[in-house]
Amino acid sequence: MKLSKNLSLSEMTKSQTASRKGIDNSPTPEHIENMKIFAEKIFQPIRDHFGVSISISSGYRSKSLNKAIGGAHKMVDGEYVATSQHCKGEAIDIDRDYANAPNNSQVFHYIKDNLDFDQLIWEFGNEENPSWVHVSYDTDGSQRGHILVAYKNKSGKTKYKVYGGED
């Protein structure tokens, strides 16, 4: 199934962790509809702009997969609740450093300067290039435009700061 001209459902749902651990990573029809909107608003414009394949290192995640990889969540009355936009079909992680241009920094800046998005994260790396780029799109239409940088603090815990801001 195609979500857009250059993005298939299988690309959005593939997961080595799910395969290795036997986790069902099948989306609901609602999640598939979210992925189609995401593909139209985020993925396809990136692909069209750069004219090269864009690999997704993490796309849709079922609740079980999100839990297995330690994705964003909260505990409500002792119950695990996945809060990652990946679990709604509204986010991807892109890693372009394995190939020719564009690199992750170029992808990040293109998104920042040209697309409406909910959240854009410069994931780790250094000041010149992130290790990967996280981008999300709220399919309900209320884009926050948050731009963040992920980093590890001295104890190794992942923290976030505003892009261009201080800790």
Image (tube, grey):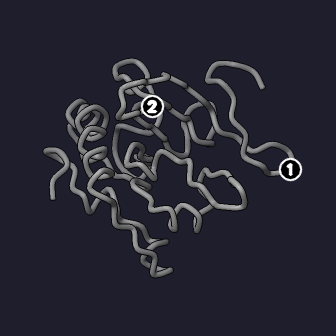
In the displayed structure, 1 sits above or below 150; it is below
- Which mark is first along the chain, 2 or 1? 2
Q: Nearer the viewer, residue 129 or 46?
A: 46
Q: Position of residue 44 (x, y in %)?
A: 23, 37
The type of residue carrying mark 2 is: Phe
Q: Nearer the viewer, residue 6 or 62?
A: 62
Q: Nearer the viewer, residue 128 or 34?
A: 34
The type of residue carrying mark 1 is: Ser
Callout 2: helix, strand or loop? Answer: helix
Count the marks: how many? 2
The answer to whether 104 appears left or right of 1 in the picture is right
Residue matched to label 1: 155
Q: Position of residue 92 (x, y in %)?
A: 41, 46
Name the mark on residue 111. none
Label 1: few (<14), some or many (≥20) within 10 Å?
A: few
Callout 1: helix, strand or loop? Answer: loop
Q: Quadrant of the N terminus?
A: bottom left
Please report the residue visible at 62 percent of the width from the left and 31 percent of the height from the top.
Answer: 127
Q: Position of residue 32 (x, y in %)?
A: 27, 52
Q: Nearer the viewer, residue 135 or 101?
A: 135
In the displayed structure, 54 sits above or below 47; it is below
Label 2: few (<14), some or many (≥20) within 10 Å?
A: many
In the displayed structure, 158 sits above or below 68; it is above
Q: Position of residue 87 (x, y in %)?
A: 45, 53
Residue matched to label 2: 108
Please report the residue visible at 17 percent of the width from the left and 44 percent of the height from the top.
Answer: 4
Can the viewer see residue 22? Answer: yes
